[in-house]
Image (tube, rainbow, N blue to C red):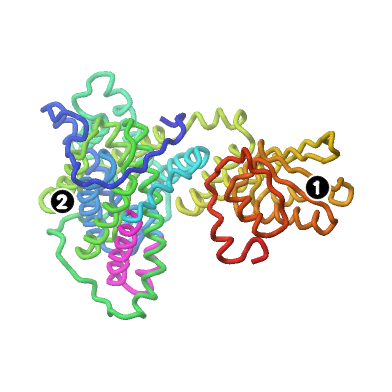
Amino acid sequence: MKNTILASFAKRLDLTELSLASDEKLTPGRLRIEILAGLTVALALVPEAVAFAFVAGVHPLVGLYAAFLVGLITALFGGRPGMISGATGALAVVMVALVAQHGVEYLFATVVLMGILQVIAGAMQWGKFIRLVPHPVMLGFVNGLAIVIFLAQMSQFKVPGSAGMPGGGEWLSGGPLIMMLALTALTMGIIYGMPKLTKVIPAPLAGIGIVAAIVIAFGLDVPRVGDMASIKGGLPPFHIPAVPLNFETLEIILPYAVILAAIGLIESLLTLNLVGEMTNKRGGASQECIAQGASNIVTGFFGGMGGCAMIGQSMINVKSGARTRIAGIAAALFLLAFILFASPLIELIPLAALVGVMFMVVIGTFAWNSLKILAKVPAMDAFVIILVTVVTVMEDLAVAVVVGVIVSALAYAWNNARRIHAKTYTTPEGAKVYQVQGPLFFGSSDGFIEMFEPEGDPSVVIVDFADSRVVDQSALQAIEAVAAKYQAAGKSIQLRHLSRDCHRLLTKAGHLMVDSDDDPDYQIAVDYGVRTGILGGH
């Protein structure tokens, strides 16, 4: 999965082809796998949603409602069967400042606006730009996210703080720590060994069930889900955010909404890509954007904190055998059932069992092969992998991906800029020919200009672009600058194998004699330069 290079997966949105069973036949066996996978995911969602609600500074039910609503809607209409969405830590850390300064009602309004922006992004098909994320950035993303998931579990090894909030500051010690570690290790051992015995029950569900049964049967005194907070509640109530509908409110919520929408879409689309590699599916980027946006709009009107795709729970779902939308739907419905009816039972589950599941997710998510290839890939690619991993851990996913893409783009531009050079020779008629080799674009335009010697060249100079590629407006400007220098020296210059649209523009400048008998048509859009007068002295 992690060795494959990212493929193009953007496709046009078509909700008329929505299928609960995707390409899988909906047999009783398939239905059992999907429902059990959904149950496993739901159990893992409970402590995550509660913890992220604490991080955002809101009531636990606000996180649970978001996990239910976002999970249900994206499971129904999302771009990839098998993906799981819900309240996430990446969004919670942004929300906390908004809640602290303006209150939870402004959070609900922000989530609605966030969803609207995501729907617009999907309608404009901006999701396809996720294809620009290079493979080293993807490796750094999964490595960083695996570390983040691991570090997030460390709070469960601390004494609970006020109001049951995980991570009170002091680490467990003595018997409680040993018991926590032992139950975590037991869960991991069951998940590792269960598939070798039977695949009737998903291994993570078996691990949670067996360890929970041991703890309940022997009355072991260990941290449980109920120690974090009660998850008992009713149906999510419809609620219009109680904020003034004026420009001042928009000024408050818009910056947060833009950041949340960007983070949510980046994490969702990268998760979509990972799940696609595991299930051999492609497409659905724009559809996923619209589904995420719609889910957040609904969530904001039903008292939820919003959310996006969750890579950890998505990995649990897929590795439990889920391949259709049924598992995600089941997970959301199980979560609602926990809130309405089964909270006393769910609150008895030991946190150690859920920590063990997430540790196995960490092991399966981390791209261990990237450690081996660091010394084999180009130094810049290795640097990008490490950089994105570190920034993901130290900052957040969105910043890490943007930084990785920018660094990769600059490295690519620099490498191509160094490729520009020219071979020269003199024709029998005495003209000097420059055979340009390498792409001519903004990064190589200065090097291109420096190749020429107008003062020392003969009266006729020919520039041959047969082995070059004129890419952008900066390249055209560089060509014109060279032509102007030869004109100032009283010499003529001819361009050969230049695209027709390029030489038409340059000819209008009045400097050039262009040999166009065998010029290719590169379809370069340069009319803008003609209209605005940026090029050719107009």
Which amino acid is tagged 1?
Phe
* Residue that numbered label 2 is attached to: 336
Which of the 4 image quarters holds residue 207?
top left
* Residue that numbered label 1 is attached to: 452
Tell me, yes or no, if residue 253 can be seen here.
Answer: yes
Q: Position of residue 118 (x, y in %)?
A: 33, 58
Q: Which quadrant holds the N terminus?
A: top left
Residue at figure coordinates x 88%, y 51% from the top left = 455
Left/right placement of residue 358 relative to residue 456 reads left
**Which mark lies nearer to you, 1 or 2?**
1
Please name whichever residue, 383 or 359, is drawn nearer the observer in this view of the structure.
Answer: 383
Please name whichever residue, 95 or 114, is drawn nearer the observer in this view of the structure.
Answer: 114
Q: Residue furthest top?
A: 197
Residue at figure coordinates x 76%, y 50% from the top left = 449
Q: Secondary structure at mark 1?
A: loop
Which of the 4 image quarters holds residue 186?
top left
Q: Position of residue 318 (x, y in %)?
A: 29, 34
Please name whichever residue, 9 or 332, is drawn nearer the observer in this view of the structure.
Answer: 9
Above or below for 515 versus 340: above
Residue 103 colored magenta? yes
Q: Position of residue 397 (x, y in %)?
A: 45, 50
Per the picture, the main secondary structure of the magenta-coloured stretch is helix
Residue at figure coordinates x 71%, y 40% from the top left = 464
Q: Position of residue 333 (x, y in %)?
A: 15, 47
Q: Nearer the N terminus, badge 1 or badge 2? A: 2
Q: Which residues are magenta?
A: 94-122
Count of number-bearing discs: 2
